[in-house]
Image: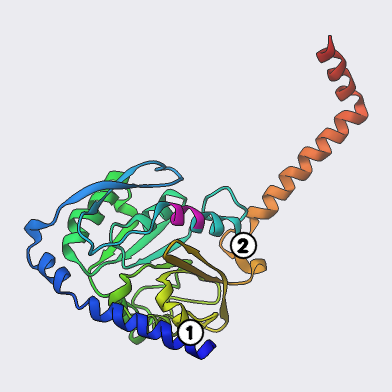
Amino acid sequence: KINLSKRKGSKRAERIMEAATGEAAAKVRANPQNRQTHMRLRIVAGTKARKLLVSPKDANVRPMMEKVRAAVFNLLSARFGGGGMLPGGARWLDMFGGTGSVGIEALSRGAESTTFVELDRWVSKNVLKVNLHTCGFLDKAQILNMKAEDYLKRSIDYPYYAGKPFDFISVCPPYQLVSYPELFDLLSRSPLVNEKTFIVVEYPIEFKYQIPDQLNTALGGVLEKFRDRSYGRTWVAVYGPTESESARINPNRRDASKKKRTTDIDAFRKRHEEGDISNDTKDNRR
């Protein structure tokens, strides 16, 4: 049964790939004057919450839905103490940047910097840069006009090309125009990924059989797939270290919150022993 389902999924994937030969997309890209934008996206939370973003009207760019972004970032934030924010100093890599909604969401939620990889120069200039300027994040962003696969290959050939490993990586490609096995292979060989990197991968149900349960890293260690769920036709898989290792970017975050709660409890007990609580209660009753 498993083999039959895989075979069926493979055929569906092939039909999608054949249907997306790129003729419609090529026509649009060949006439950039015909491309237009509209404002239908917004930042979900953080310092730029509810900020509107522009996106292309054509189907060449497919941004991550708001409800999916909200769920993903809340999940990641929970690994660092909650509150909807990312740990300070975090570096985010937004592959297939498009509108930049994912990387900008990361900046809004406390990431220190984001690197966007986007092949379409028109999108980079008229959409991504515009959104970064609108949110005031141009100084925290780097835009690279190239294929995401080529970026990973260059990091493999030249390990110091992109600096140290990223803390978070989002992979939200145009489904029909990429090879998920190739992407996972490049990620596993790239020094941009280590055993403590979190990776978010968006994919359609037709390619589910191509999504592995874990990802070996070139620098040692294994990233486990700890979340894999659907949002309509869209599926999102999240890879990362075990929960006990998640606080390595800001290791004092949880300890500080626990210390604060303990201090509050101790203060309450001390007041109760001194009789302040009972006196306050009597005063309030009067």
Mark 1: which secondary structure? helix
Relative image position of residue 198 (x, y in whole percent) = 51, 68
The residue depicted at 41 percent of the width and 78 percent of the height is 207
User: Is 29 left or right of 181, judged from the image as shown?
Assistant: left
Which residue lies most toward the bottom here?
Answer: 3
Disc 1/disc 2 C-alpha distance (Å):
39 Å
Residue at 22% of width from left, 64% of height from top?
A: 60
Which label sits in the foreground, 1 or 2?
Answer: 1
User: Please, what is the three-letter code of the amino acid marked with disc 1?
Assistant: Ser
Q: Is residue 237 above or below residue 270?
A: below
The residues colored magenta run 67-71
Q: Quick one: label 1 or label 2, which is nearer the N terminus?
A: 1
Q: Is residue 137 above or below residue 187?
A: above
Disc 2 target residue: 247
Which quadrant does the C terminus fall into?
Answer: top right
Closest to the observer, 80 or 259: 80
